[in-house]
Amino acid sequence: MSKPTIIIGLPQSFGMHNSFKKNLAFYGFETIDISYNEHDFKYKNLGQKIYNFFRKTFLKDKGYKSKLKFQVFSKEVVQKLNAIQGKADYALLMRADIYPSDVIELVREKSTFMAGYQWDGLHRFPAIYPLIPFFDQFYVFDKSDLHQNVFQFYPITNFYFDDDQNETAIPTIEYDLFFVGTLIERRMKNIKRLNKKCKKLGLKPFINLYCQNPKDKEAYDDQGYHFIHQHMSYEENIKNVKRSGILLDFLNTTHEGLSFRTFEALHYNKKLITNNPRVKDYDFYHPNNIFIWNETNINQLEDFIQKPYIMPDAHIKSKYGFGNWIKYVLNREPFDPITLPE
């Protein structure tokens, strides 16, 4: 019996496309990967930047920048798609707004069933809207996006990669708390407060802050943060997750969907500290395992850390693994539906 074929496309920025391919192979798929690194794009000159502003503002062309980003990779991607004999069984594009519409049309032509997943708030990347009609099913992880009237959207969450579910080695815990994220000024107040509290409790935090401009970190140089100037790969991120006792998650204020960090904590049986109150509505939530902190309850952190971890229900946990997630997205029964709480 031949393997089902799937076209996948997503940003390469953190190397997550490699984990996708690995997990798809684990579950018996043959992958055609059209992912590309759109994160490092820079305008060639000021004129190109001004022209994009003009198209976006006055011509309402929200996808013009995607065309510019994609130019370097266009030939290779189109060749991959045109090399497909007949049609692939499936296509799955995540953040499809990084592709120009003619490529989306070609993926549509070359696939029998085409699914999209926007793992960010829809309004943050409005170039996605004119592309949605190309998809058979389009998934969102923010409840506020689910009930828009123009398109039919399907609920979903992020997930954890589960091809390592049979590993038996238990890594040594090196850090009490782990965080990686971009240095964004508006959330540094919370990071500083939590970092200070953890140190008072005698904990060893490993807080990684990505910043391109060295001047951005000057105000925080003496506070024990680890500054990185290249994005941490997803593989390295998972190594640090495994070596840490507690994971730290900060809500992106542009949406209320649960981060990948939430599901990494679920998979590896790690405690989670997050400022996303929505997590309390999900079926895997337990107050011993997840601390929802705000401006007033940081003094409750010590009690949370001392409470025993409660193992989550195995069936609920497996629902959020990649194996069930990919079957749900592609409508390959049997699967457990992944819903968003009301």
Image (cartoon, rainbow, N blue to C red):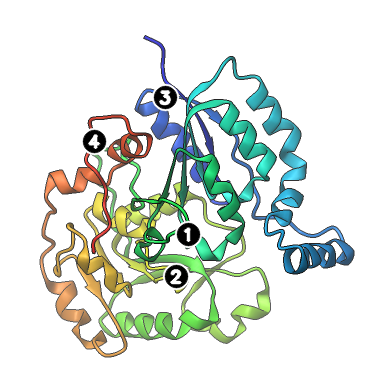
The amino acid on which the numbered mark 3 sits, given as a three-letter code, is Phe
Residue 14 place in picture, x, y as percent: 54, 51
Residue 49 place in picture, x, y as percent: 81, 65
List the residue tagged with mark 3.
Answer: 29
Left or right, 311 with respect to 341, comes to left
Q: Residues within 10 Å of mark 1 (few under 14, many from 20)?
A: many
* Callouts 2 and 1 close, C-beta under 8 Å: yes
Identify the mark nearer the N-term, 1 or 4.
1
* Callouts 3 and 1 close, C-beta under 8 Å: no
> Can residue 268 be seen by looking at this rendering?
no
The secondary element bearing badge 2 is classed as loop
Identify the mark nearer the N-term, 2 or 3.
3
Q: Quadrant of residue 167?
A: top left
Please tell me how many numbered marks the rendered image carries: 4
Q: Residue at x 23, y 64 (%)?
A: 342
- The answer to which of 138 and 170 lies nearer the viewer is 138
Q: Residues within 10 Å of mark 2 (few under 14, many from 20)?
A: some
- Separation (CA) of disc 2 from disc 1: 9 Å
Q: Residue at x 39, y 71 (%)?
A: 250
Left or right, 116 with respect to 320, comes to right
Q: Residue at x 52, y 84 (%)?
A: 222
- Separation (CA) of disc 2 from disc 3: 32 Å
Residue 85 place in picture, x, y as percent: 59, 14
The secondary element bearing badge 4 is classed as loop
Identify the mark nearer the N-term, 3 or 1.
3
Q: Which mark is residue 252?
A: 2
